[in-house]
Structures are given as structure tokens and as C-alpha cells.
């Protein structure tokens, strides 16, 4: 099991547990609910990883220009990532 799956699994456990304990959802099959939440979270984490990779690739394509302009890479990465997320309808 990959790291993304492990993180998604832990998050799913916590989410389902809170929903049940606080009685915010009527969960009949907690195991199935955890699996569904885990799958959704894993897909979301994968999409975010792809977004980050695409942002890095775009910045790499313009590395010389970035170096010449003395821009802050982290700030540019954050801006590019936010722009790509908005274009793709992805909420960060």
C-alpha cells in the first residue's frame, strides 16, 4: 500500500468515526463507508500530486527566465499551482 493510500485510510477512519460519534450521518456499514471515503480522498490526493507536478513542469520550462528575473520560486510555484487548480475546478 502506498503512502497516499495510507494517508487516505487514516483520514477516512477519522472522518467516519467523527460522523458516527457526532451522529451527523446514519452509517449502517462503517467498513464500506471508510472504503468509499478512502477512495475519494486517495483520488483527491492523486489529483493534487498531479497538479503539483504540472506546476513544477511549467516552472521548469521557464527556469532561465525565472533565474534571470530573480523571482521567488516558492511564490511562483504557489501562484502557478493556484491558477492550474482554478482552471481545473480543483479546490485547494
Image (cartoon, rainbow, N blue to C red):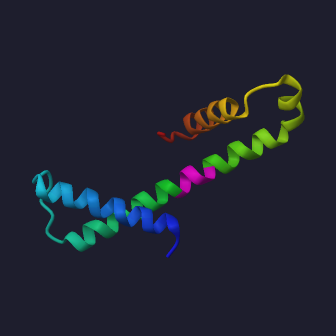
Magenta segment boundaries in residue numbering: 46-50
Residue farthest toward the bottom in the current orientation of the protein: 1
Residue at 46 percent of width and 61 percent of height: 42
Percent across and percent down for residue 91 are 47, 39
Depth order, front residue of 4/83: 4
**For residue 31: magenta?**
no
Prevailing secondary structure of the magenta residues: helix
Decide: is 89 above or below 25: above
Closer to the camera, 6 or 50? 6
Left or right position of 90 against 72: left
Residue 47 part of the magenta-drawn span: yes
Instruction: Give the left or right position of residue 12, taking residue 18 as reference.
Output: right
Residue 64: x, y in percent?
Answer: 89, 34
Locate residue 12, reporting x and y percent: 32, 61
Whether residue 40 sits left or right of residue 87 in the image: it is left
Spot occupied by residue 8 in the image (x, y as percentages of width and height): 41, 62
Give the answer, above or below, for where 47 lies relative to 92. Answer: below
Q: Residue at x 33, y 65 (%)?
A: 36
Amino acid at each position: 500500500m502506498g503512502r497516499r493510500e495510507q494517508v487516505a485510510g487514516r483520514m477516512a477512519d477519522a472522518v467516519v468515526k467523527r460522523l458516527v460519534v457526532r451522529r451527523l450521518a446514519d452509517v449502517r456499514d462503517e467498513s464500506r463507508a471508510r472504503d468509499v471515503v478512502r477512495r475519494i480522498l486517495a483520488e483527491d490526493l492523486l489529483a493534487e500530486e498531479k497538479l503539483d507536478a504540472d506546476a513544477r513542469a511549467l516552472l521548469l520550462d521557464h527556469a532561465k527566465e525565472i533565474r534571470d528575473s530573480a523571482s521567488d520560486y516558492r511564490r511562483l510555484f504557489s501562484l502557478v499551482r493556484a491558477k492550474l487548480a482554478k482552471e481545473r475546478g480543483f479546490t485547494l
